[in-house]
Amino acid sequence: MDKNWKLDVTEDTESLLSSNERTTIPEISSWNRRKIHRRPRSMLQTFVCGSLCIVGLFLLIYIPLFSHYNARIFPLSNWGYNTSRNTSDYVLPSQDTVMVFPRDVCDSNNKFFLLIMVSSALGNFQARQNIRETWGNTTEFNYPMFWKFHSKLKGKFLDLRQKDIEKYRMFLNMTDEDLTQKFSKDEDRNNTLRYHNVPVKIVFLIGRNIYDPYLGNGTQTRLDNEIREFGDILQEDFLDTYNNLTIKSVMMLKWIAETRCHEKFKFLVKCDDDSFINLPNLLHYLLGGTLPLYNSTVYMYDEKSYKVLNERNRLTQASNLLIGYKFCNSKPIDSVTNKWYMPYYMFPNDTYPNYLSGGSYLMSSDIVPKLYTSALSSSLIYLEDIFITGISAEHAKIKRQHNPLFLFNYAKNKCALKGVLTEHYIKDDHMRDSYHFLVNFGNRCPYVDRKILTKNLRNSKNVCH
Ligand SMILES: *[C@@H]1O[C@H](CO)[C@@H](O)[C@H](O)[C@H]1NC(C)=O
Ligand SMILES: *[C@@H]1O[C@H](CO)[C@@H](O)[C@H](O)[C@H]1NC(C)=O
Ligand SMILES: *[C@@H]1O[C@H](CO)[C@@H](O)[C@H](O)[C@H]1NC(C)=O
Ligand SMILES: *[C@@H]1O[C@H](CO)[C@@H](O)[C@H](O)[C@H]1NC(C)=O
Ligand SMILES: *[C@@H]1O[C@H](CO)[C@@H](O)[C@H](O)[C@H]1NC(C)=O
Ligand SMILES: *[C@@H]1O[C@H](CO)[C@@H](O)[C@H](O)[C@H]1NC(C)=O
Ligand SMILES: *[C@@H]1O[C@H](CO)[C@@H](O)[C@H](O)[C@H]1NC(C)=O
Ligand SMILES: *[C@@H]1O[C@H](CO)[C@@H](O)[C@H](O)[C@H]1NC(C)=O
Ligand SMILES: *[C@@H]1O[C@H](CO)[C@@H](O)[C@H](O)[C@H]1NC(C)=O
């Protein structure tokens, strides 16, 4: 649900007006035709003028008053007016709905720093494999790579502070002994994290096949093999369809909350299987540092956020945090053919609560149970990001924060990937090309040109804070 911000209200009113005209005007003219034979011409003209004026006045008053009843009347084909929108009816809070759970994530005693839940359609085998072999390979693509990416830009971004490193060590329950075992003595102990892979878990989130999983054809065998080989899949018991993506995300919250997994990690990122996560950058940001400005990312920043050497631009919050690319005051789409069409019965309001793009959003682990409880008592809508980060977060009184580096689409310039946290709509070969571009340290990406810097920034007034 990323593109509705492009729609503007005048367009909606216009289409509404023409549909009203089509139904009212012909009736009046046929009524007038009957009277042509009995009345003089001048009186007829007066009459036509008068009735048109009345109809015009009526439309003027009627449209603004009742427009929301008229638009968005068509039902969704597989989510009709009478289909239950009680989240509990699908998520079944009192039942165990896990069909397959990932190994060594929530069932393990080890703490880890970041959990990335990738929403994936059951049949997207290749998309999952692409992720495993690119940004999801956390043994290769991890924090030490941050220092390789930006080695030429030392001093142009904020490094971690000693107290951030200590906090992180305490969270992972890393003792001095652990550290000396892991790192040679002559290494600068204060910089140990630079050489250290941060523990990150990646889990793919899928639902149930349309067909009985145990009677299915090749798909199920292939899935079984995938589960056996990688053990990184959470399969929950609901139909895996686009209109059920909200249920998928609530199932994710359910699994984390019920296993009390949120006590084992600090941050959660939910993304799609066509999202690209720049994990080294993300870890640096989450641990308390800032990212350097590249020429190709500077347009994403505004007058405040571009000051990456300002302490204020560090992430200091590790609780009650919900952050991503924020959309404000978006309107439900009334075009039935649009992928994000929203019927009035499903969302009886003119404006969505502010929400974060579903391409990727980040939260601190403590809000997972709060969001889960809130989601269960909110009336379900099929647009996942609006439901989770808009409606449920609003009910739970969790503030949504904007960070443009969780880019909701993708940047044309490949270099942008070096300076962002995430991008969206990156698939197949594009995913592999992007990754190889990024990890090829021979590719130089220009640092922002001071002369054009302020000229290219976004106006803060247009940014949704
Ligand atoms: C929806 O429910 C109402 C009231 O229970 C009923 O009158 C109506 O026929 C139902 N509509 C459909 C399409 O099932
Ligand atoms: C939703 O369903 C649950 C269990 O079926 C029920 O306890 C709850 O009252 C329902 N909520 C609403 C708003 O109808
Ligand atoms: C991840 O990277 C390591 C180190 O480069 C490599 O040995 C391994 O095969 C990669 N794993 C996958 C799934 O690509
Ligand atoms: C931290 O680790 C020590 C031993 O390494 C263990 O005794 C202690 O229970 C751990 N604390 C937590 C909170 O996991
Ligand atoms: C390393 O950190 C300690 C505090 O833990 C500090 O006293 C010391 O000055 C730091 N050393 C360097 C080289 O920054
Ligand atoms: C499985 O069978 C269904 C029809 O029974 C078919 O639509 C689907 O494409 C098949 N999937 C594979 C992977 O063969
Ligand atoms: C969503 O999942 C539920 C539970 O599996 C299923 O009954 C329903 O038909 C699905 N809805 C859609 C729109 O796919
Ligand atoms: C930096 O970006 C601007 C446009 O945003 C472009 O005109 C300029 O050529 C770029 N500079 C470099 C060194 O790539
Ligand atoms: C509609 O949305 C606005 C803005 O989010 C909110 O203030 C208002 O209470 C909502 N109205 C209803 C009936 O939910």
Image (cartoon, helix red, strand yellow):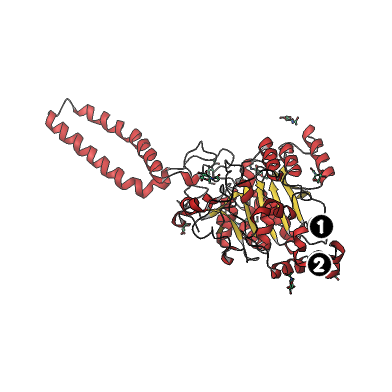
Q: Mark 1 and mark 2: span between their CA atoms?
A: 20 Å
- Element at badge 2? loop
Q: Mark 1 or mark 2: which comes first in sequence?
A: 1
Determine which of the numbered discs, if any, sits on residue 186 in the image. Answer: none
Residue nearest the observer in this picture, 123 or 201 = 201
Q: Where's residue 316, x and y in %? A: 63, 66
Left or right side of 382 for 125: right
Quarter of the view holding residue 228 = top right
Left or right side of 5 for 115: right
Q: Is residue 116 above or below residue 175?
A: above
Q: Where's residue 226, x and y in %? A: 81, 41
Quadrant of the rendered image holding ligand 1: top right
Residue nearest the observer in this picture, 284 or 74 = 284
Left or right side of 321 for 255: right
The residue positioned 76% from the left and 42% from the top of the image is 133
Amino acid type of disc 2? Met
Residue 21 shows up from this direction? yes
Report how many numbered discs are placed on residues in the image: 2
Determine which of the numbered discs, if any, sits on residue 107 in the image. Answer: 1
- Crowd band around label 2 with a 10 angstrom C-alpha radius: few (<14), some (14–19), many (20+): few
Amino acid type of disc 1? Asp
Q: Is residue 397 above or below residue 340?
A: below
Q: Which residue is mark 2?
A: 174
The answer as to whether callout 2 falls within 8 Å of ligand 4 is no
- Element at badge 1? loop
Residue 377 shows up from this direction? no
Q: Where's residue 12, x and y in %? A: 41, 42
Quarter of the view holding residue 127 = top right
Q: Is residue 332 above or below residue 337?
A: below
- The residue furthest top is 37
